[in-house]
Amino acid sequence: MSQKPDYAAMPDVLQAVAQIRDGRLTSVALVEQCLNSIKANNATLNAFGDVYAEAALDHARQLDALAERGQFAGPLHGVPFGIKDLFHAAGLRTTRGSLTALDHVPTQDAPIIERLKKAGAILLGKTATTEFGWTGASTSRVFGDGRTPWDPALGSGGSSSGSAIATAARMVPAALGSDGGGSVRIPSAFCGTFALKGSLGRIPTWPWSATEMLSHAGPITRTVRDSALLFDVLSGPDARDHQALPAPDESFLSRCDQPLRPLRVAYCPTLFDTPVDPVVASIVESAVNSLAHGLPVEIERLTLDWHDPLATFETLWVAGRGIAYGKSLKGRESELDPGFAHLIERAQGYDLSDYLTANQQRAVFAHHVHALFERYDLLLTPTLPIMPFPAHLTGPADSHDGGDSAVAWARWTPFTYPFNLSGNPAASLPCGWSAEELPVGLQVIGPRHADAQVLQFCAAVEALLPWADRLPPMLR
């Protein structure tokens, strides 16, 4: 009988880096630990697709040989990662969660993969995503429905489902995801992990996307400082991304170690008059009260009169993705997720005037968001207004009818996609657990380009309300 993995012994990224550098841990041992964890639970949770066991072990042996000579390949030397199966990795199958792309093998690394490799990390495998990352649910005909390790009957959220599951279930120290409408924050809220959607362009993206004005790339981690280290490694311009921001002028990780200055914080228990599950509302309210008493912050409860930009988001999401993919997938509709096929069909109803109007509306909404930060340093909201729902569903069973909408999932994620429209940094952190031990996420939004401030605040929250060592029941 095989021995149950010691999940509590799985180090986070910073712990793994330190242990490998001082000789307490070998990269081979860490990769084996990850593979054992994947073997134990991946069939239940559906976090990983392709796993590169032998290649990862070979790479680990090479890096261990370097370490024995006192040489290190970079700041992530020997640490294994999962990478969302939307990111191009040269020579590795990238299915993008679609039956239409099962044989797709890129010849060039995306910038985020290139930088991960350069930092000395090991690519352990590809993590699950919904088809072309189109939805916030975690259903998949390629990987199987993603499940939160806190209750495998329930969904993990998406579209970076596998990356959040793999991190929460101690299959890897951390993983990479992407976010076009909440896709690192939604699964982090359901899986009890930390994720920051950085400012638009903070981490460069490539290849080009029809929703490039919404698309972000970044890590999903157990701790805030792990995320800060990875933002240090992954940020900075790349010629392939015309939206990429200049290199940051400070270390995100170092900023997390600085004392928090007094901050003016706005707290919105909801946005757009959205009903919030009483369990979510109570846990978030309790956490915000703890922050008010435990941190140097002045928190003001607000009701914002912002107009819900759902129609704007839907036009950009559906017209952009639907028209682009509709051309390349013409004649293959039967192979697609029905929801994505519906999105392509709906895209035909938009014209150039609709798209330009949506871009104008996006600018107006973004103005309202940016104006708020002339008065406040940060904005707090629940990450989601709901608790996790059954894994086989594409939304809560009691959610109101989305009609003919091609983004019905956005109706239960109304607090995440607005900040893709505005490009602000927005993080999700676990702020408490329900009586059934399901995590609840708190969203922290900052001014444009204030990623360091968001990370510093989140690090202070983590010190006050720690979460990283709490194991899901199935791992105990």
Image (cartoon, helix red, strand yellow):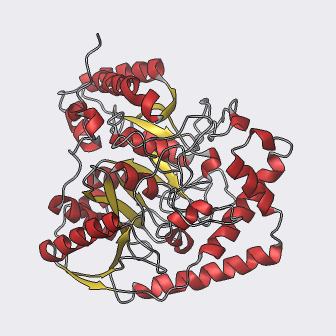
In the rendered image, residue 153, in percent from the top left (x then y), is placed at: 42, 41
Q: Which residue lies furthest to the left in this view?
A: 294
Describe residue 455's horizontal placement relative to residue 274 as left or right. Answer: left
Describe residue 419's horizontal placement relative to residue 131 as left or right. Answer: left
Describe residue 120's horizontal placement relative to residue 321 as left or right. Answer: left
Judge by depth and name the residue closer to the eye, 331 or 76.
Answer: 331
Q: For residue 70, which quarter of the picture?
A: top left
The relative height of residue 442 versus residue 353 in the rendered view (above or below) is: above
In the rendered image, residue 56, in percent from the top left (x then y), is placed at: 43, 24
Instruction: Residue 290: tell me if it is visible.
Output: yes
Q: Which residue is drawn at 44% across and 37% down?
A: 82
Q: Residue furthest top?
A: 1
In the rendered image, residue 323, in percent from the top left (x then y), is placed at: 79, 58
Instruction: Residue 200: tell me if it is visible.
Output: no
Q: For residue 173, which quarter of the picture?
A: top left
Q: Residue furthest front?
A: 398
The relative height of residue 139 versus residue 194 in the rendered view (above or below) is: above
The relative height of residue 406 versus residue 132 in the rendered view (above or below) is: below
Q: Which residue is drawn at 43% across and 45% down?
A: 154
Q: In which quarter of the image is the C terminus?
A: top left
In the rendered image, residue 211, in percent from the top left (x then y), is placed at: 65, 62
Total number of numbered discs in the rendering: 0
Q: In which quarter of the image is the N terminus?
A: top left
Q: Residue furthest right?
A: 331
The relative height of residue 95 versus residue 299 in the rendered view (above or below) is: above
Q: Which residue is drawn at 19% across and 61% down?
A: 257
